[in-house]
Image (tube, rainbow, N blue to C red):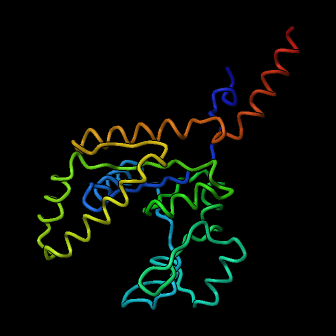
Amino acid sequence: MSSDAKKLPSRRGLLIILSSPSGAGKSTLTRRLRAWDESLSFSVSATTRAPREGEIDGQDYYFLDEAGFRHQVSEGQMLEHAHVFGNFYGSPKGPVEEAISAGRDVLFDIDWQGAQQIQNSDLGKHTLSIFILPPSIAELRRRLESRGQDSAEVIAKRMQKSWDEISHWAEYDFVLVNDDLDATEERLKSIVEAARLKRIQQPALTDHVRALQAEYEETA
């Protein structure tokens, strides 16, 4: 068999959305996923807030004024966007398109509203959405309290927000209960590997099948 025949078809990158209530372990799982595959990159968000000390435009955020941000939204250049605490935040479409066309997966750490916007965009067919659930509400509260950073009032607000987020679990492609971090990590990696093999993620398959057809017709 020739080396060309052994060569695997190239693939298109995925838009990997990870969502969860605060305290469900998403940040740890994201770090582990990126350690497993260093080619995975985070989508760099755009924002209208002022840069903080040490932040670099295009690396930490794309810093835009409000007029520029609104213009990009109106031109369809944002995959998702939201207004949070007086500032706009969003995911620019151009860099994501460039990455997935080159076969690189892009991670999105966003809530259900952002996930819904991306899934409904013209790149939605290349989206893999995963929701992380805690094993119980009691465990979720324990994790929030163990941080030792928030008052009881703040924790109560976080719990309410967490439940609002959990109520949208059924809108995701995959849902994982994070009752064991190592096991959840392995399941998460299996999901990503399987999604990469979906037919729509392998555009070179069409040419490969055509080559098989030509070869078959020559020998028939």
Q: Position of residue 204 (x, y in %)?
A: 71, 38
Occupied quadrant, residue 74? bottom right
Please, is residue 217 above or below residue 111 in the view?
above
Where's the N terminus, which quadrant?
top right
- Front residue (pair 2, 216): 216
Query: Is 97 placed left or right of 149 in the picture?
Result: right
- Front residue (pair 132, 188): 132
* Residue found 65% across the figure and 76% down from its top: 73
Query: Is 20 placed left or right of 215 in the picture?
Result: left
- Front residue (pair 188, 219): 188
Q: Position of residue 9 (x, y in %)?
A: 65, 36
Q: Position of residue 28 (x, y in %)?
A: 28, 56
Occupied quadrant, residue 183? top left
Query: Is 174 placed left or right of 207 in the picture?
Result: left
How many numbered circles are shown? 0
Please, is residue 72 above or below residue 104 in the view?
below
Where's the C terminus, which quadrant?
top right
Q: Position of residue 108 (x, y in %)?
A: 47, 61
Please, is residue 112 above or below residue 33 in the view?
below
* Residue found 53% across the figure and 39% down from its top: 195
* Residue found 62% across the figure and 33% down from its top: 8
Query: Is 83 placed left or right of 9 in the picture?
Result: left
* Residue found 37% across the figure and 59% down from its top: 165
